[in-house]
Amino acid sequence: MTAQVEAEPPTDGTGHWSPGDHILWRYRANATDRVHICRPVTVVRDDPDLLAVWLASGTHCVRPVLADGTPPYQEPLATRYTKPRTTAVGTWTGTGVLKLARPGQPWSVWLFWDLDWRFRNWYVNLEEPLARWAGGVDSEDHFLDIAVYPDRRWEWKDEDEFAQAQCVGLMTAARAEEVRAAGRAAVEHIESWGAPFTSGWEHWRPDPAWPVPALPDDWDLRRV
């Protein structure tokens, strides 16, 4: 297990954020404590059952890049996870992404739309259960994902990256089996076709008055 940022609840007296609050949704680099993905988001809903946030188009986000600035996906898979890396700030484009996460669940579900707001698909992102802290939530991505479509079809995504991460030591065999087990549980959940696939989130729209959250200078530090 990799070390996690010590979690603590929001300091609003309820333990939950309010709709419209701005928080950070962050990921640690695998097998390290270093934050390498940071996305400022707007809280849509936060209660004991669900955290829903909106990643707006135009948001300045931190993403991993190779030391020469090349996006990792442009690097051949054989060396994608072994070349030196750093981070860069870029702008999120498109219609934005709605992210849904249940407490303790080893995945979050993301909703994607086309530019005309036609719903495209759900995306089940396998990851560490979110750890809450005063300024947001932290996790670690587990490479393997599942795309889910409105006609109830689903398919595995990034199985090649999942395998390569194991080959280069970013994930132990035991952890990989835990991730596979989480994936199988997610598939069972998909095939049962309950929430969030029947919750109507695909018809949700962000409040046009919401400002785009800012990326703080200390995005990589714990903020209390």
Image: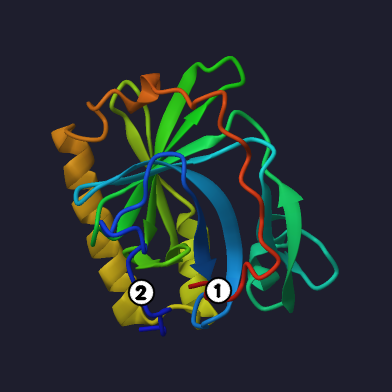
Percent position of residue 30, x then y: 51, 75
Q: Is residue 217 left or right of residue 67?
A: left
Relative to 199, does residue 72 appear above or below in the rendering? below
For this orientation, the residue located farthest to the right is: 68
Cα–Cα span, label 1 and label 2: 18 Å
Q: In the image shown, does 178 or 105 lie closer to the viewer?
A: 105
Number of callouts? 2
Q: In the image shown, does 19 or 63 lie closer to the viewer?
A: 19
Within-10-Å neighbours for mark 1: few <14, some 14–19, many 20+: some
- Judging from the image, what secondary structure is the residue with disc 2 in? loop
- Judging from the image, what secondary structure is the residue with disc 1 in? loop
* Residue 35 position by quadrant: bottom right
Image quadrant holding the N terminus, namely bottom left
Percent position of residue 101, x then y: 32, 50
Q: Is residue 15 left or right of residue 91?
A: left
Relative to 68, does residue 45 appear above or below in the rendering? above
Q: Which mark is residue 144?
A: none
Query: What type is the residue that disc 1 sits on?
Result: Ala
Percent position of residue 192, x then y: 14, 36
> At x 32% / y 66%, what residue is drawn?
9
Determine which residue is flagged by label 2. 7
> At x 67% / y 59%, what residue is drawn?
62
Percent position of residue 117, x then y: 53, 18
Q: Is residue 94 left or right of residue 83?
A: left
Q: Nearer the viewer, mark 1 or mark 2?
A: 2
Query: What type is the residue that disc 2 sits on?
Result: Ala
Within-10-Å neighbours for mark 2: few <14, some 14–19, many 20+: some
Mark earlier in primary sequence (1, 2): 2
Determine which residue is flagged by label 1. 29
Q: In the image shown, does 101 or 22 lie closer to the viewer?
A: 22
> At x 38% / y 24%, what residue is drawn?
202
